[in-house]
Image (spheres, rainbow, N blue to C red):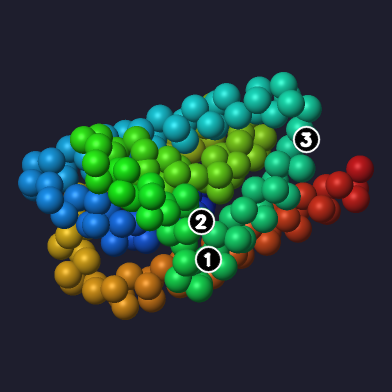
Amino acid sequence: MEIFFLVFVALFSVINPLGCIPIFVGLTQDYTKHERRRVALWAAIDVALILLVSFFVGEYVLQFFGISIDALRIAGGLIIASSGFSLLSGKFSRTRGVTKDVETDAQSRDDIALTPLAIPMLAGPGSISLLIAMHQDYTSTLEIILLCAAILAVSSVIFFVLKSAHYLSKILGASGIVAISRIIGFIVIAIGVQYIISSITNVFKL
């Protein structure tokens, strides 16, 4: 179960669904409770599908473009660390591609579960590159099953967080969400730096 918890914590930290609460509340302020639950459910399902596809297919995409796994880990580490710094500075929504134009466009559409919620807010480049790299680290059947279970567990947490977003925003408040995001940001930076260090070490060993 160690793999399950490691993957769960890493994915949860990088995705940081708590940081999406203010954006979700803003996009669904005119929705009914049933509509918010539906959007939250489909956003979580979309994230799970995107992450699973990234894990199983990402390696072949790398091979097609001739990108080494160490290059991906360094690039992914930089993206993850950058996301962590954005969390610490309170500017994470900008790194998720949620500009004012995107938010306005989302509010004018009926379905916002896939975009901008699932992509790019939740399943972004950081989580996708993380899973592609993990495909090289976890190869046995049991490890793959545990990793997929961790992805589904994170998606379930995303559903409950988004479903309760309006309630959590009142309980935690803006300052509470920022405080939690900054703590998570520190963990995210550490994950990114570790990926960069391990990749550079592998390159010099070669």
- Pick whichever, 33 or 53, lies toward us: 33
Tag 2: Cα neighbours inside 10 Å, few (<14), some, or many (≥20)?
A: some
Instruction: Indicate left or right for 22 with 88 as reference.
Output: left
Q: Residue at x 55, y 26 (%)?
A: 56
| Callout 2 amino acid | Thr
Q: Residue at x 78, y 27 (%)?
A: 66
Mark 2 to mark 1 CA distance (whole Å): 7 Å
Q: Is residue 194 above or below residue 205?
A: below
Front-lying residue, 8 or 200: 200
Q: Is residue 25 left or right of residue 3?
A: left
Residue that label 2 marks: 95
* Residue identifier under label 1: 86
Q: Residue at x 50, y 73 (%)?
A: 89
Of labels 3 and 2, the one closer to you: 2
Task: Indicate whether 64 appears above or below 199.
Answer: above
Specify whether 138 is left or right of 91. right
Question: Can you give x and y, in whole percent of width and height, for residue 92 in the image?
Answer: 46, 62
Please tell me which of labels 3 and 1 falls first in the chain.
Answer: 3
Q: Earlier in the sequence, mark 3 or mark 2?
A: 3
Foreground: disc 3 or disc 1: 1
Q: Is residue 116 visible?
A: yes
Look at 57% across and 24% down and name the residue there: 57
Q: Nearer the viewer, residue 143 or 45?
A: 45
